[in-house]
Image (cartoon, rainbow, N blue to C red):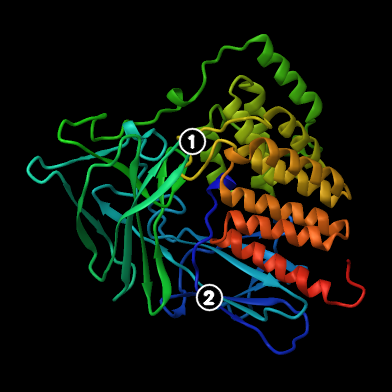
């Protein structure tokens, strides 16, 4: 899943913090509806080191009693633990009936001593669409080709009933519908919001404005704990919403059913120009194959489009063998389709996310050079702006520079990107970029500039998990600044 698509759920979990504790492994208890979670499938764990913006190989084993899991304590820092459980084996992973959560936490020398994590179950919404199957273009296609609801001539409104399956007894469901548009992405205002203990709700909706669509989302809580969340899938694209339009009485727009999105319709024509050939040659010269290349078996699976790329990405990259398989397939896809700049840009950004440390720098330097001014597609990302893919690459390269003692290069790169492309990048993306800028200043012992960069990021994006992350970073700077022998 592209990272711009990675959303941290609002999970309520208890972090037990003692007054003093020796560094030790961290027990993990998974819970659902206030009780220890009992499942038949093994959970899959992955750790995101948010300080370095990279997935790492966290060591998690089942406890001796079999009721918990144990995380080998990582070094101090901020992390996100992604846990997914493919409990419903009748459908793919991360579909209804499964459990899925992104859980942020911070590790210090003595805390936490335990993680208690509420696991939300993915809700199946059965009407007017069924998220237990591929939605055939709902998410990936532009507003004019999304599924539509017809308004009644006499009322000027459309009546629609959303129905879903219960996830827990007496759960309270919060549903909402907001207006959204792409190019540039804008969300709001909210059209409907409500709560119910029933498993259906009938709503009356006005026509959606031209070039806009509606987003329906739902979540479930019980006793203050998140017990249900919602995910949708469409030809490799995933979201946390249904997207649709409400059409006027004249029936403006396309038909009410979304058209299937085929692989052939998403791929560029297989016509190579001299420019394409030159790109492929330079790619292979400047981004050499990793040393492990021949250890990964050849696969009949091929990546020939962004849809293929996202489908393989979502099949999982948590384990080393899966990460290397993805890297190799994407590398080969770019060589085979050098004229598809969308595939190259999106693929390169995801390759950097799974690359070994030694392979990351040449990959990112090539990507930033070639795609600094790239405008990403918006039809396959509900919350993106045209500069977000480039912004993520710039941030990754800056982080790589910082880790190699090249903080000045990181600062110059970020300042150039902000000066030239600020208007093209989502606020949340800019906030994380300013956090990276702050780390560069901090490594140069410029605490004032580091704190100013954090404050600039918060000014642009004051709410959300990204803002929470910036505030924790700022608090860490404050603590360290107040210590003896702190940087100036």
From the viewer's perspective, tell me whether residue 361 is left or right of residue 229. Answer: right
Rendering coords of residue 343 (x, y %): 58, 29
Closer to the chain start, of discs 2 and 1, is: 2
Instruction: Please tell me whether residue 247 is drawn above or below residue 460 in the rendered image.
Output: above
Question: At numbered mark 1, what does the secondary structure look like: helix, strand or loop?
Answer: loop
Instruction: Please tell me whether residue 184 is drawn above or below residue 411 in the rendered image.
Output: above
Residue 64: assigned label? none
Decide which of 144, 274 is in the foreground and name it. Answer: 144
Rendering coords of residue 36 (x, y %): 48, 78
Question: At numbered mark 2, what does the secondary structure look like: helix, strand or loop?
Answer: loop
Instruction: Please tell me whether residue 68 is drawn above or below residue 189 in the rendered image.
Output: below
Residue 378: assigned label? 1
The quarter of the displayed image where residue 477 is located: bottom right
Residue in view at x 75 percent, y 81 percent: 110
Rendering coords of residue 384 (x, y %): 52, 42
Tell me if I can see residue 38 in this picture: yes
Instruction: Please tell me whether residue 437 is drawn above or below residue 421 in the rendered image.
Output: below
Decide which of 359, 401 is in the foreground and name it. Answer: 401
Outermost residue to the left:
154
| Mark 2, residue position | 13
């Amino acid at each position: 899943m592209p990272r711009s698509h990675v959303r941290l759920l609002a999970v309520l979990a208890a972090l037990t913090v003692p007054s003093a504790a020796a560094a030790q492994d961290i027990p993990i208890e998974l819970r659902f509806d206030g009780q220890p979670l009992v499942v038949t499938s093994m959970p899959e764990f992955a750790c995101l080191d948010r300080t370095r913006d990279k997935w790492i190989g966290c060591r998690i084993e089942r406890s001796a009693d079999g009721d918990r899991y144990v995380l080998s304590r990582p070094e101090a820092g901020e992390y996100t633990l992604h846990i997914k459980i493919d409990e419903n084996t009748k459908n793919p992973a991360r579909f209804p009936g499964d459990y899925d959560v992104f859980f942020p936490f911070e590790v210090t020398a003595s805390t936490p001593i335990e993680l208690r994590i509420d696991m939300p179950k993915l809700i199946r919404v059965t009407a007017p669409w069924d998220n237990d199957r591929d939605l055939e273009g709902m998410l990936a296609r532009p507003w004019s080709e999304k599924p539509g609801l017809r308004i009644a001539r006499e009322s000027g409104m459309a009546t629609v009933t959303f129905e879903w399956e219960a996830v827990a007894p007496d759960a309270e469901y919060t549903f909402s519908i907001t207006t959204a548009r792409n190019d540039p992405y804008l969300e709001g205002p909210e059209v409907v919001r409500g709560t119910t203990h029933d498993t259906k709700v009938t709503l009356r909706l006005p026509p959606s404005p031209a070039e806009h669509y509606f987003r329906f989302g739902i979540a479930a809580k019980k006793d203050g704990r998140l017990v249900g969340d919602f995910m949708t899938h469409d030809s490799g694209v995933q979201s946390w919403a249904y997207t649709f339009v409400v059409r006027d009485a004249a029936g403006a727009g396309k038909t009410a059913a979304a058209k299937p999105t085929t692989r052939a319709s998403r791929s560029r024509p297989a016509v190579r120009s001299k420019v394409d050939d030159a790109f492929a040659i330079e790619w292979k010269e400047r981004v050499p194959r990793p040393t492990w290349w021949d250890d990964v078996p050849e696969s009949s699976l091929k990546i020939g489009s962004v849809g293929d790329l996202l489908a393989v990405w979502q099949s999982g990259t948590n384990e080393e063998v899966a990460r290397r398989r993805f890297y190799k397939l994407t590398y080969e896809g770019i060589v085979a389709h050098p004229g598809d700049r969308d595939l190259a840009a999106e693929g390169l950004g995801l390759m950097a996310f799974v690359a070994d440390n030694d392979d990351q720098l040449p990959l990112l330097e090539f990507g930033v050079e070639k795609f600094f001014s790239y405008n990403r597609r918006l039809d396959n990302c509900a919350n993106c702006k045209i500069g977000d893919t480039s912004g993520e690459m710039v941030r990754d390269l800056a982080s790589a520079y910082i880790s190699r003692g090249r903080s000045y290069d990181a600062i110059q790169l970020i300042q150039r990107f902000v000066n030239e492309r600020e208007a093209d990048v989502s606020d949340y993306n800019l906030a994380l970029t300013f956090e990276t800028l702050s780390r560069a200043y901090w490594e140069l012992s410029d605490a004032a500039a580091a704190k100013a960069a954090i404050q600039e990021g918060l000014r642009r994006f004051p709410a959300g998990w990204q803002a929470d992350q910036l505030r924790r970073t700022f608090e860490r700077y404050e603590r360290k600044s107040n210590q003896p022998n702190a940087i100036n």
